[in-house]
Amino acid sequence: MPSSPSPSHELQTLVGLGVGLVGVGMALGALSIPSASGYAGVGPNFLPWVVAVALMLCGGFMVREARSGGFRNMEEAGGDRPYWPGFVWMSAGLLANAALITTIGFIFSCALCFVLAARGLRLAAGEDGGPRSWLADALTGLLIASPVYWMFTKFLAINLPGLTQSGWL
Amino acid sequence: MDIWHQLMQGFATAGTPVNLLWAFVGCALGTAVGVLPGIGPATAVAMLLPITAKVEATASMIFFAGIYYGAMYGGSTTSILLNTPGETASMVTAMEGNKMAKSGRAGAALATAAIGSFVAGTIATVLVTLFAPVVADFAVKLGPPEYFMLMLLAFTTVSAVLGQSTVRGLSALFVGLAIGLVGLDQITGQARYTGGVPELLDGIEIVLVAVGLFAVAEALHAVLFEGRVVETANKMSRVTMSGSDWRRSMPAWLRGTAIGAPFGCIPAGGAEIPTFLSYAVEKKLAKGEHQAEFGTRGAIEGVAGPEAANNATVTAALIPLLTLGIPVSNTTAILLGAFQNYGIQPGPQLFTSAAALVWALIASLYIGNVMLLVLNLPLVGLWVKLLKVPKPQLYAGILIFATVGAYGMRQSAFDLFLLYAIGVLGLIMRRFSFPTAPVVVGMILGPLAEAQFRNAISIGEGSAMVFLQRPMSLTLLVVVVAVLVVPRWLKARRSNA
């Protein structure tokens, strides 16, 4: 085991700290929950405290593991160099979808998400997709989103937002 | 006799054209998601949870059950033909199945997997039929302390025993419990961790967490790390088995079933242990040239046994789910969530309060197994085509379905932002090899366990001694401690020796 902290161990320390911080957050939240246990003996703030303390302990343990040779029994992670541009494309797709779904409707919003996510994945795979692939993705996205929309709104009567009130678009 | 009568009633309900159609669609969809990499039964059921708002309970439970075990059939197809298993339990199938496929025997491997799944699934369904009512009768006698201990056992096995690291397993469990805490306290109605956001009073939807952790995280992982990974597919061959294949497969199926079924019955985690165990047994029992095939040309026993064990475990896992209300895997946890959406709490009372539903569900397991055999033997070529879907379209398409699931549940765009955040969380968890099952099980079982715990304490008039004073609860506590301590003790002894 190498003892000098490698970059991945730094990240692991951060993850451990993050878990610990969630624990601290849970503890802060637990402070404002009344303990009024009444007849039950144990009140609504009992489990929150258990969870808070447990998360802080787990975080502490993980930081210790990270500082002494890294997390134990890690799986071999495949494809080590992350491809961030792809991540940005896909994130943009998902967030645009969340932001636009109520205004431009399910079909267009999902098709947009599809196009952006597919773009990220194509770039990640080293494809150089020209305008043709943009068009193909847009069509595919519409072809998946439309039947899904109709099936859920017409057949299962589940409300999904449309551009119009017709339930078709 | 009574069971027989109720089962026939169940067949009458499950056999209506509408319910048969739901079962068929479920099985077909299940096979598809099993075959497709990047999406599994837990994700698929979670995405479709919104239908519980409109579709009647029996129909949708039949549908979900079809997806649940259809995916087990489909998963083996992928693991035999591709070099990436769709779900963990088919990892073992991948080891031998892949070798067989590489030496030109893909067809035989697929056949033994499908028929073995059928044999094991059917035997295990018979066990569910016979034993679930018995367990339910017994479980009625359990009080809150015993229930809490059973849930504690489920938490322990799912987080601390399975998986590579206890610390990461426990962290995942407590994160799940933390998510489960958001919303109104069941007993006092006290709001917890809502931060004044009205959307959070109802708690965080299971769909969001499951779809975020599995589907969105999977897609993000694919775009970040798997762009250049090229998957190689093996050549298909005719799906038949020779006489010697049958002779070698049959005992392996039965042994696999015998190993898998008991593991499903106890609240002790997923199908990984029984499949590995079955593999080890088959390897040990094989003789001469058959043994030499293990790890080289691929031994058919090594596919038949684990595949049967997998299906037996998965089917038998319905016993603790239906009779105790305790899920031990991602998918059963989400099935529990589906029941809850109908205001039905699985548990011993289920066999009396919702008898028609339970028996229709059990009957549909028999029907579904037959459907799946047909779907997977003659039609396997159809599913294999799914493996040709290119990755960009596949993952981008999954995101559309993720949106349907997440948005359809509560019609709130806020949930879609939350979905993205949970997806990023899932990505980090995957990268640092945190298990996901404890999150989902913790989130769903947590509130139930908390209620049982508090009820138990009030039975004990405020004293935690109640857990030690009742023999059954004390026994379970000892089991929990043993499950935690014994593996470590064995390991320590081995490294000292």
Image (cartoon, rainbow, N blue to C red):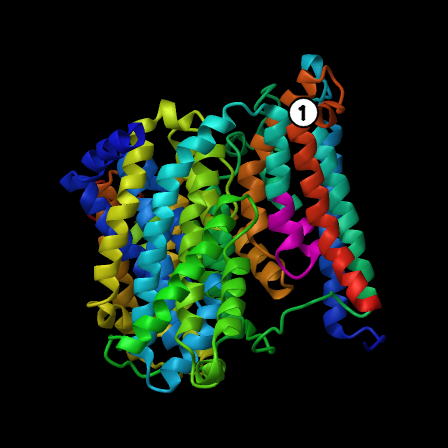
Q: Quadrant of residue B311?
A: bottom left
Residue on which disc 1 sits: A44
- Quarter the N terminus of chain B occupies: top left
For disc 1, the chain is A
Q: Is residue B21 magenta?
A: no
Q: Secondary structure at mark 1?
A: loop
Q: Which residues are magenta?
A: B155-172
Prevailing secondary structure class for the magenta stretch in the rendered image: helix
Is B400 displayed left or right of B287 in the figure? left
Residue B397 appears in the rendering: no
Q: Quadrant of residue B254?
A: bottom left
What residue is at 67 percent from the left and 16 percent from the top? B459
What residue is at 53 percent from the left and 60 percent from the top? B272
- Quarter the C terminus of chain B occupies: bottom right
Tag 1: amino acid: Pro
> Residue B239: x percent and y percent?
25, 75
Indicate whether B221 appears above or below A153.
Answer: below
Q: Quadrant of residue B182?
A: top right
> Residue B190: x percent and y percent?
62, 22
In depth, the one of B191 and A41 nearer the eye is A41
> Residue B356: x percent and y percent?
29, 29
> Residue A130: x percent and y percent?
34, 81
Classify mark 1: residues with Cα within 10 Å, few (<14), some (14-19) or many (20+): many
